[in-house]
Image: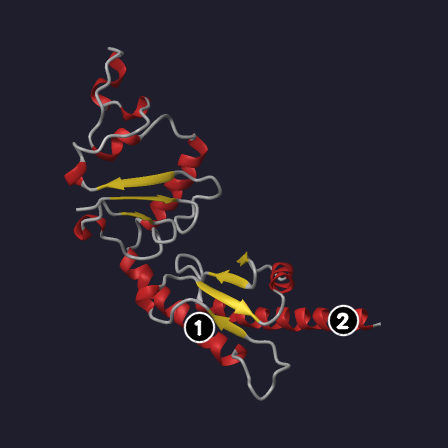
Amino acid sequence: GCFVGFDLAHAVGNVELHLHDWGVDFACWCSYKYLNSGAGGLAAAYIHEKHSRSIKPALIGWWGHDFKTRFLMENKLQLSEGINGFRLSNPPILLVCALQASLEVFGQTTMKALRRKSILLTGYLEYLIKHYYSEDKTNPEKPFVKIVTPSRIEERGCQLTLSFSLPIKSVFKELEKRGVACDMREPNALRVAPVPFYNSFRDVHRFIEILGSAITSSKQTANNTALSGSY
C-alpha cells in the first residue's frame, strides 16, 4: 500500500527501464550524467498514470497550467494532469538545446542495443583489471586494484567502482594528467564508466594501459615520500 519512488540519476540512459510496466509510482532523475546534457542539465520526473488525477504538486508554477487555457489569463489555475502539472516555469533555452541534441542521438538507437554493448564493455574492463591488477599474495609490494561493484551484470550499469592499495588522490591526479576523465570518492575509490554511447573497446584497453602508468608513477611518489620522511 505504500508509494514507491526511485532516484534514477545513474539509471536513465544507462540501463533499460520499464517504469509503467513495473508499477513504479514515481521517479526523478538528472540528465547531465548518462543522457549527456552537460553540467546543470535539466531534471526530469515521472508519475504513473494511475496517479495522474490524485497526486498534486506542492509547488505550483506557470508551466503547470493546462496548455490549452494557459494564455487566457483567467487567474484561475487549471492544473495539467500527471507530471505536466509539476512543471514550474520556462527552462533555460541553452540547457534545452543541449538535452534535445543528446536525445536526438539516443533516438537513433535503442536502450536494448546500448545495454548489450555496455555489458560487453564493462565485462571487458572487469576482466582486464582482474588480469593485470589483482592482489598478488606472493608479492606484497605490488600495488593492486579491487572492484567494489558487484560482478553480476543485473546489479550494475556501465560503471565500475575501484579501490586501490595506493593513495587514491595520487592515482587520480596521474590519470587526469594522462587525459582520463573519472570520478574520485574518498577514502580510496575511483568510479570508472565506459559509456556505450561513445566509448569503445579500444578506449577500455587504452585506459588499462594508462592505469598501469598511473599506478607506477603513484607508487614512485609514495616511495619518494616515504624515503624523505625517513631522514
Q: Residues within 10 Å of mark 2 (few under 14, many from 20)?
A: few
Q: Residue 99's spot in the image, x, y percent?
A: 39, 41
Residue under label 1: 126
Name the amino acid, label 1: Glu
The reply to whether dot 2 and dot 1 touch (C-beta < 8 Å) is no
Which residue sits at x=32%, y=61%? 115
- 70 left or right of 217 in image: left
Colour mode of the rendering? secondary structure
**Name of the residue lying farthest toward the front:** 1
Q: Residues within 10 Å of mark 1 (few under 14, many from 20)?
A: some
What is the secondary structure assignment of the residue under circle 2?
Answer: helix
Q: Residue 64's spot in the image, x, y percent?
A: 28, 26
Q: Residue 213: which quarter of the image?
A: bottom right
- 152 left or right of 200 in image: left
Which residue sits at x=33%, y=68%? 153
Q: Residue 120's spot in the image, x, y percent?
A: 37, 70
Which residue sits at x=35%, y=52%? 13
Q: Which mark is residue 209?
A: none
Residue under label 2: 224
**Disc 2 and disc 1: Cα gap in Å?**
31 Å
